[in-house]
Amino acid sequence: MTAARILVIEDAEAIRAAVCSALRDHGLEVLPRTDGRELEADLHRFRPDLVVLDVMLPGRDGFSLLEVVRRGSQSGVVMLTARDGVPDRLRGLTGGADDYVTKPFVLAELVARVDAVLRRLGRTPSTMQVGGLVVDAESGVVNYDGNAVELTATELRLLEYLAAQRGRVVSKTQILTAVWGYEDYDPNLVEVHVSALRRKLEAHGPRLLHTVRGLGYVLRPGDT
Amino acid sequence: MTAARILVIEDAEAIRAAVCSALRDHGLEVLPRTDGRELEADLHRFRPDLVVLDVMLPGRDGFSLLEVVRRGSQSGVVMLTARDGVPDRLRGLTGGADDYVTKPFVLAELVARVDAVLRRLGRTPSTMQVGGLVVDAESGVVNYDGNAVELTATELRLLEYLAAQRGRVVSKTQILTAVWGYEDYDPNLVEVHVSALRRKLEAHGPRLLHTVRGLGYVLRPGDT
DNA sequence: CGAGTTGCTGAACACCCGCTGAAATCGGGA
DNA sequence: TCCCGATTTCAGCGGGTGTTCAGCAACTCG
């Protein structure tokens, strides 16, 4: 399966960079734009599966761009809205979008919502498989070698992240930002949860979650 | 089954956006329009199963558009009427709309009526089944393991939503917007009604409505 | 071989989440 | 208007969870 394509339209440099890199880390293909001037062309050439769209843009605002997207493609849309300034009751009305995220937001949340929309649009399968492990993000069900495994919410988020990065070594720092949204934090937090995950998973099968000393962890079937 | 297609014609930006977003959240495919200028073309190309039509539109009014819809398609029609002015209602129904909703309306209500019309048109099955549970949305009859279950209106709406999302974890926030139309509200409201539902359902059978701590609820047969 | 670093895990604990009984409020009919 | 059921609010209670901490094990490098 080829990676889903995401078009990101956001004028603020820092946010755009952070969002794009988070989505890329998640295995998605990303096209960054600072405005919607070439939107039609982008839709046509890049054929995004989903558009991440800031509401506040210089020039044309996000809503009119949303219309353009709707008219010109089947893409999903996730909007970035500012929390302050807009009354709460209007927040639900910021739509026509498939989902929206209010600033300031945690990157992990945006990624999760993008994932959810892609899933709903059928663009992405909701279950991931690594060795004998099956993780279904939609239903929250985890199976290892045929046995149902009960996980807590954080354990599930952690496992989903590791499964999405299957075969790749991820550092504790990366995990902290992706799963918790923390920038600088005690790595032991990760170690504790990894420990818990192992206890629950490997009660039903062989080792899966490997430590790479000095670097981080990998989710990979096999003993190496 | 492929999702039903809904054409929404409404000039007021905020309302159109809200309606579209609510319908999309409900799993329907939506095409938004601000006026009826391209109605014939839309009917022909998009082939909507149902049209949501505002009565008050700039230019041609809703009734003449209704005629166009009737003439050019088999689509159902739900009209949005300004106030509960009796003349409007009569015209809407005698004009052949399948249902109408008076502004201001709660999103959940519009969605429910759209659903009802789709069912009546045979576009959507009216009964849903999950394990030993059978919910007939049209008649409001609920059966669990052969026993009739008496539910209040809210409990029924809640159960219908959960049944439509069967096997998927839905957050209390999602439930609040889908069932109540609330954007930001006390999750305890959901908990109370879930509690009531369980008391009535699980008097006649095994657990069905599972809590996923930190994430939400799932309707799913089985003990896991 | 020893010191320092990195990773693992059991235990403790504060906190948050979800559940529920009961009170308060709402709303529709007679 | 009153009444009654439905809905919503409130408060308290368990218990599950996330996080911290400390001690120990494993590994690296001098």
Image: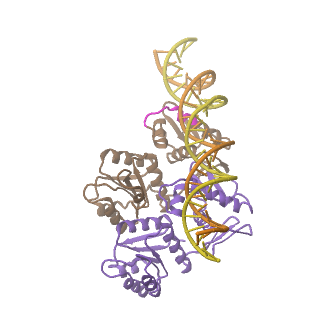
Chain colours: A brown, B purple, C yellow, D orange
Whether residue A128 appears in this view of the structure is no
Which percent across, then down, holds residue A119? 50, 59
Which percent across, then down, holds residue A189? 53, 34
Question: Which of A177 and B108 lies nearest the eye of the viewer?
Answer: B108
From which residue to which does the magenta span run? A183-192
Which percent across, then down, holds residue A125? 52, 58
How many numbered markers are drawn? Answer: 0
Question: Which of B92 and A137 lies nearest the eye of the viewer?
Answer: B92
Question: Which of D22 and A51 lies nearest the eye of the viewer?
Answer: D22
A204 shown above or below C14: below
Q: Residue at x 65, y 56 (%)?
A: B195
Please identify the quarter of the rendering in which residue C12 is found: top right
Question: Which of A91 and B20 lies nearest the eye of the viewer?
Answer: A91
Is residue A188 located in the magenta-colored stretch of the structure? yes
In this rendering, position of residue A77 left or right of residue B196: left
A42 shown above or below A17: below
Quarter of the image with the C terminus of chain A in it: top right
Q: Residue at x 46, y 83 (%)?
A: B97
Residue closest to the far left: A59
In this rendering, position of residue B31 left or right of residue D28: left
Is residue B69 located in the magenta-colored stretch of the structure? no
Please identify the quarter of the rendering in which residue A184 is found: top left
In this rendering, position of residue A75 left or right of residue B219: left
Whether residue A89 appears in this view of the structure is yes
Q: Residue at x 37, y 54 (%)?
A: A81
Which percent across, then down, holds residue A104? 39, 47
